[in-house]
Image (tube, rainbow, N blue to C red):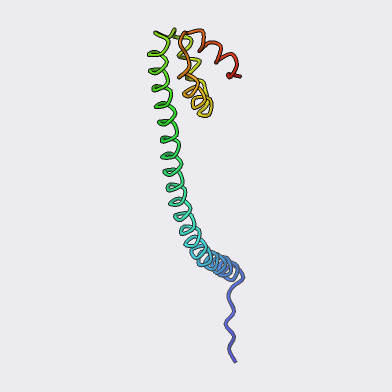
Amino acid sequence: MWIPILLTGLEAEFWQEFKQFEQERRMSYITTGERIGYERGKQEGKLEGRLKGKLEGRLEGKLEGEQLLILRLLQRRVGTLPEFLKQRIQTLSTTQLETLAEALLDFTVLEDLLNWLEANQS
């Protein structure tokens, strides 16, 4: 009976290449799975980013619109507003702006606005 025997140097080289071959096969499978997972995650991340961006843009636009409307209404009720008051109004939250929108209907002078800001702005 003949048994093939590799020379000691060749046997070590054979096993090294065999291990590398197995790792590459295993890695290509893992890499494919990882790649698919990465692509899905990337797509979900892009979608989530777009949705978040749209929502933030809408909220920011709504806030700016409310600020501009209130500034215009205040100007009609009490006259020209000093810049520092415009800036204070632009720091108000949406809830504060909504409250101011109702309150300004009763304003007749600039002092009414100043009093409201003192009472409602933290």
- Residue at 55% x, 64% y: name it: 23
Name the quarter where the C terminus is drawn: top right
Q: Give the total of numbered labels.
A: 0
Which residue occupies the extreme bottom position in the image? Answer: 1
Residue 74 is left or right of residue 96, and the answer is left
Pick the residue in front: 85 or 115. 115
Residue 5 is left or right of residue 50, and the answer is right
- Residue at 58% x, 19% y: name it: 120
- Expressed as whole percent of the image width and height from the top left, the position of residue 25 reads 50, 67
- Expressed as whole percent of the image width and height from the top left, the position of residue 73 reads 39, 18
Q: Quadrant of residue 15?
A: bottom right
- Residue at 49% x, 58% y: name it: 37
Q: Quadrant of residue 79?
A: top left
Name the quarter where the N terminus is drawn: bottom right
- Expressed as whole percent of the image width and height from the top left, the position of residue 32 reads 47, 62
Pick the residue in front: 105 or 66. 105
Pick the residue in front: 12 or 100. 100
- Residue at 57% x, 65% y: name it: 16
Pick the residue in front: 61 or 8. 61
Image position of 115 with respect to 7: above or below: above
- Expressed as whole percent of the image width and height from the top left, the position of residue 107 reads 47, 14
